[in-house]
Image: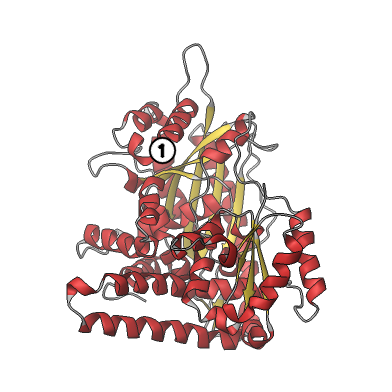
Amino acid sequence: MMSLFISYNREQKDFADKIESSVCKVCPVLRDTIDIAPWDSIEEFMRRIRQAEYAVLLISDEYLKSINCMYEACQLYRDTNWKSRRMYVVLGNADQNVYTVANHEQYIQYWQGKKNALEEQKNRLPGESIDSITAEIKRVSEILLLLGEFLKDIRDTNNPQPKNTEEAIGAIIDFIATKPISKGVPSNDETSKTSNVLKKSLVDAGFNGIFAEVSHDEVLSLINPHQLRLFQLGVVDNAFTFDALKRFLLINIGQYIYSRERIQKFMDDNEITLIGLKAVELLRDRCNGDLSWLGDELGDLMLYIFLEQILDAPKVFSKFDLPSDGKLVPGSSGVHLLQPDKAIPSYQMVFGKSRIVGDPRDAIDAAFVTLEAIKNDTSREMRLVENTAFDKQFKPEVAEHLKSLILPTKGQSATHDTAFGVFLGYSLGLEADTKSREQFRAELEQKMQLDIKNHVTYIADKIKAAKMERYSFYFYFLPFNKADGEKQSIMSSLLGLKGGA
């Protein structure tokens, strides 16, 4: 049965009472005053926000400064479908601050100050006495990580006006009645089953606010489904800016590097806020002072993001999921699973490759060396499931289901096709110093469209020369200012290495 979780600060108890008295006639209500028994864990109750089909968050200044309220919001954000479940009611004392971007800074400063104070307190105490403070610091760190996206989502949502209580409560009831939420109940339909077993791992922390798609008229004219997509980052002072991108990468770098089972372990240990830090430490150790390979890591991370967000193909493996002496397939960045729909008639194992090089043609050439090697490696699927790491990456039922897709059973043909996902970063090559902001922005889109036009035939010819016309290809292009230098400076910045931008 569906249920509604009410997340609120005690200052808004009267409003919560009114919601409960009305909504309880429609569905069960989860609320601290009725669902926490004497001596029960308050933290365990707060986590139940993820179990409810719907959540209404009463946003006030007190809410945005309450560690328990914001902890509940963070729990909700851990689910991939959180946007379809949440409802905000912004109350008067937060109205101006939430809907004015410039005022968001005060909440960020508030939580940063809270974290600094806790860390100072931790440093003053003996090691055996700091467990509770360490746990509190983890909570505050998670709040800081998601606060910007949380405020942006509230501001961007058409929230009902709380001044008219009856209308606001009526909107909540209408939302519950008209937007049924799937909680992942298995279906007899095989497509549905796979979708429930393997979901996207990416945290959508504002993708559309960071990447803008640029339209163009070019097509590859392949016989099977394919994509040729072009994106750009935000522009400041006639140059692409990377601040928002780096934040997005930091939020998702742990999702890219670690398997689902390892991520679940972080969550079970209440250490999800550490996942990005641990991923950064892992890359920093592997780097060992050599920055030359970091650009490839950025490309692979970007490809993971585009395959999950744009293609809607969940990650099966990244190259970090296998032992250090193992090979996924020759040079592959990772493997994703694209599930059937009206456009895609069968499952597709999408093998990825990325390149970030100044000249687009050089990037294409370098990518196709690996793509051809993958195509010619007929034993790749067998190695995927025979690798000793495979059963450690997934729950047993998920592992068995993926094996049934990757390898045919006796007397049956293969249950999937092969596809290729490619991320290509290149240097824009548009003069910036001699153009006004208006001139630069006017010519920017034209230059990117021309870049695609000048290379679409070259890509098609490479596919034909490699005898790969029967495969699906999913290309994602993103220009940089100066790709060769920026790919290293961005990753160096993420890893906290000298020379990072």
Q: How many marks?
A: 1
Relative to 70, 262 lies left or right: left
Give residue 360's position: percent from left, percent from top. 48, 57
Quadrant including the C terminus: bottom left
Indicate whether 153 appears above or below 380.
below
Relative to 25, 488 lies left or right: left
Indicate whether 100 appears above or below 218.
below
Give residue 424's position: percent from left, percent from top. 48, 55
Residue 443 visible in the picture: no
Frontmost residue, 376 versus 261: 261
Give residue 11's position: percent from left, percent from top. 60, 82
Indicate whether 189 appears above or below 433.
above
> Residue placed at 42% from the left, 37% from the top?
372
> Residue placed at 71% from the left, 54% from the top?
27
Frontmost residue, 56 versus 426: 56
Give residue 200's position: percent from left, percent from top. 52, 49
Residue occupied by mark 1 = 395
Frontmost residue, 254 versus 168: 168
> Residue placed at 28% from the left, 59% from the top?
283
- Residue 430 position by quadrant: bottom right
